[in-house]
Image (cartoon, rainbow, N blue to C red):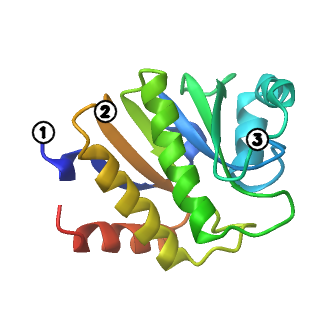
Amino acid sequence: MDLKDKIIVTQGDITDIEVDAIVNAANTRLLLGSGVAGAIRRKGGDSIQKECDKIGSIPLGEAVVTGAGKLKAKFVIHAAGMHLGRSVCEESLREATNNSLLRADEKGVKTVALPAIGTGVGGFPLNRCAQVMIDIVVEYLKNEKTGIEKVYFVLFDMETYKVFNDYLRKVAL
């Protein structure tokens, strides 16, 4: 399968997509507060936050997996792009994105959906986020050992969708 068939950019609510795993733009304390994390907690139910509480804090840039509660996905991959109350930096975004894909492979996930990590409360610039995340996904999917078949970027608003879609079309896949 061609790499460009493996990466899909779509606009919508990540909590509604039917994939094996969705990625949560998390903080290191795994508190599901606002933005994507808040939507996951509201729609998925309290079980997700309870699993996060059992895990406790994780290092910046790391990712952990919980169940997905009432969501259509089987798993939620919590990618710690920032410390609670702080902003996202490029290094933590790179590591969080890569570690999300590693956790997906560890769980045997075939389809995974990512949000624009860090562009909300994390304050990371949208254009740079698209470049960093898409570049990492493209590079990761070139690895023969990955079992991931499709990566969806599920972006909440039209502006974010356009930035990601435009960048994906620019990269020579």
User: Looking at the image, which is closer to me, 100 or 19?
Assistant: 100
Q: Which residue, given by chain and number where applicable, does mark 1 sit on? A: 1
In the rendered image, residue 68, in percent from the top left (x then y), is placed at 64, 25
User: Looking at the image, which is closer to me, 61 or 111?
Assistant: 61
- Of mark 1 and mark 3, the one earlier in the sequence is 1
Say if 150 sits above or below 46 in the image. below
Q: Which residue, given by chain and number where applicable, does mark 2 sit on? A: 146
Q: Please give the label number shown on residue 137.
A: none
Label 2 crowd (10 A; few <14 / some 14-19 / many >=20): some
- Using the numbered discs, state the Cα–Cα distance from disc 2 to disc 1 in whole angstroms: 13 Å
Farthest residue toward the left?
1
Residue at image location 77% in from the left, 47% down from the top: 38
Q: State which quadrant residue 50 falls in.
A: top right
User: Looking at the image, which is closer to me, 163 or 141?
Assistant: 141
> Residue flagged by tag 2: what amino acid is it?
Thr
In the rendered image, residue 36, in percent from the top left (x then y), is placed at 68, 51
In the rendered image, residue 99, in percent from the top left (x then y), is placed at 53, 43
- Of mark 2 and mark 1, the one earlier in the sequence is 1
Q: Please give the label number shown on residue 58.
A: 3
Say if 117 sits above or below 76 in the image. below
- Using the numbered discs, state the Cα–Cα distance from disc 1 to disc 3 in whole angstroms: 35 Å
- Asked whether residue 138 is in view, the answer is yes
> Residue flagged by tag 3: what amino acid is it?
Ile
For residue 43, side relative to residue 109 (left or right): right
